[in-house]
Amino acid sequence: MKWNSLIPNLMCDDVDATVVWYQQHFAAQLFDQVPFEHAPDRHQWAIIGIGETSLMWQATESLRADVPFMADRVPGGGFTMFIRVEGLVHWASQFAEPERIVKPLHTTFYGMQELYLRDPNGYILALAEPVSPA
């Protein structure tokens, strides 16, 4: 067996608002989306791309219907995404939602600059960039 890609399918209460947030903060591109049959003005899922990565956002009601095991789960939970980025210090200095910062920009003992923030669904984004050599 060969894995070709990994696209996390993440539960959220509002797919459209989530896509907009990621577009505003990370210049995400919308790759695909499907509306609800009963509410065509709302999307049940969407796939976005940021750089070379992709994320799928699926509405809570849709994911619970597809996977009954998820019936008692809520968005966010204990899920953390570790994301290697470029330009973290500049981006962090202009980030306009300080209430979302879980752990401020810091340098680790293993040579990374990291910033932890909470997205609108409660997921923790650990943004990390190697420290430039002196």
Image: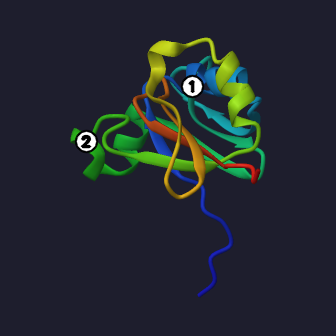
Which of the pair 11/25 is nearer the observer?
Answer: 25
Amino acid type, label 2: Ala
Which of the pair 75/127 is nearer the observer?
Answer: 127
Other-residue count near label 2 (Cα within 10 Å), few / some / many at <14 / 14–19 / ≥20 = few
Q: Nearer the viewer, mark 1 or mark 2?
A: 1
Report helix, strand or loop for mark 2: helix
> Where residue 126 appears, x then y in whole percent?
51, 42
Which residue appears at 70% of the width and 45% of the height? 85
The outermost residue toward the front is 134
Q: Is 33 left, or right, of 36 in this rendering? A: right
Q: Is 126 left, or right, of 32 in this rendering? A: left
Which residue appears at 49% of the width and 23% of the height? 14
Q: Is 21 left, or right, of 99 in this rendering? A: right
User: Of callouts 1 and 2, which one flags the residue occurring earlier in the amino acid sequence?
Assistant: 1
Report helix, strand or loop for mark 1: helix
Measured in 3D between alpha carbons, the distance from the residue under mark 1 to the one under mark 2, in whole angstroms, is 21 Å
> Where residue 45 appears, x then y in whole percent?
57, 37
> Where residue 92 appears, x then y in whole percent?
65, 25
To which residue does mark 1 refer? Answer: 18
Above or below: residue 22 compared with residue 123? above
Q: How many marks?
A: 2
Other-residue count near label 1 (Cα within 10 Å), few / some / many at <14 / 14–19 / ≥20 = some
Q: Which mark is residue 130?
A: none
> Where residue 59 appears, x then y in whole percent?
46, 32
Which residue appears at 43% of the width and 46% of the height? 80
Q: Which mark is residue 71?
A: 2
Above or below: residue 12 compared with residue 98? below
Amino acid type, label 1: Thr
Which residue appears at 67% of the width and 20% of the height? 93
Which of the pair 57/25 is nearer the observer?
Answer: 25
Q: Tell me the quarter of the image containing the N terminus.
A: bottom right
